[in-house]
Structures are given as structure tokens and as C-alpha cells.
Image (tube, helix red, strand yellow):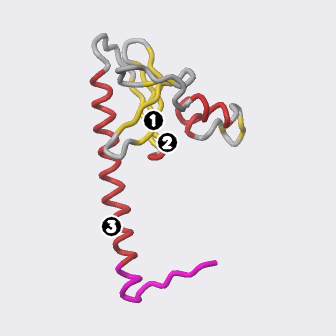
Amino acid sequence: KLGRLFLNGGVWEGRQIISEEWVKESTTLQFKRPASSADYGYQWWVRTFGAENYDAFFAQGHFGQYIFCVPELDLIVVFTSHHTGSSGMYWEFMERIVAACESYEEKVFGSFIDLCRSAVVSGRLRLRSR
């Protein structure tokens, strides 16, 4: 729910319960950490994932509790675990999940866009402006 609240700009069930300005401010880079896997916003970690370097923010709790949000993909990924080792596996999981989303979008929307382009070129589809 927290991830969805922040992806929705602080709106929950039609009500603004956290200011949109705070959501934007807290989920963007505020402190760059040298040689780190993630930088920091305000109470959120920030970094990019995927071949397209999608901006993401995430909360990290004790023993592998995570909420990852990738706004451009409208993606929320939650991990609940009891992992006491390195957090590197979570970065790998997120890279793979984002890659799967990128692949899916390309297959679905790329094919649709190609279909529309060919229909316009062949005259089977006319675009109208309002």
C-alpha cells in the first residue's frame, strides 16, 4: 500500500493524504553516496534499473524487507524475506523483473505501434485530430 500511495503521488482512494510535492522531493536524489549501489532521497533509496535506466525508489527494511517502485513502468515489487547476506541478489531480481517488463512492453506495444504505422501508410487507418 505504501508503494501504491507513493506511485499515485500521495493520493489514496481519491484523497490527497501526502502532499505531491513531498512525494516528489522524498523519492528523488538528495544525497549521492560515493561508490554505492544506491543513493538517498528522504527516507527512500533511489537508483535506476533496466537497460533504459528507469528511475526507481525503494524502502529497505531489516533482513530483506523491500518495497521497490518504478514509476515509469507503474511497477511495485515487494520482497519479504529473512535474508542476512548481501543485498546484491535483490538488485539482480529487480534487473530481471524490469527487463521482463521492458520485453513485454516492447512485444505488446511495439507490435501495436508497428501495426498502426503500416495501417496509416497503406491508407487503412486515418488519424484525426480533435
Crowding at label 3, few (<14), some or many (≥20) Cα neighbours within 10 Å? few
Taking the magenta stretch, the answer to whether it contains residue 128 is: yes
Left/right placement of residue 2 relative to residue 70 reads right
Report the residue at 42% width, 31% height from top: 47
Residue closest to the far front: 34
Above or below, 108 relative to 91 = below
Crowding at label 1, few (<14), some or many (≥20) Cα neighbours within 10 Å? many
Q: Could you tell which of marks 3 and 1 lies nearer the N-terminus?
A: 1
Left/right placement of residue 41 relative to residue 56 reads right
Taking the magenta stretch, the answer to whether it contains residue 35 is: no
Q: Residue 67 appears at what percent x and percent y?
A: 45, 27
The CA span between labels 1 and 2 is 7 Å
Q: Which mark is residue 111?
A: 3
Residue identifier under label 1: 56
Quadrant of the frame with the C terminus: bottom right
Residue type marked 2 = Pro
Q: Residue 125 appears at what percent x and percent y?
A: 44, 84
Residue identifier under label 2: 71
- Disc 2 is placed on an element classified as helix
Residue type marked 3 = Ser
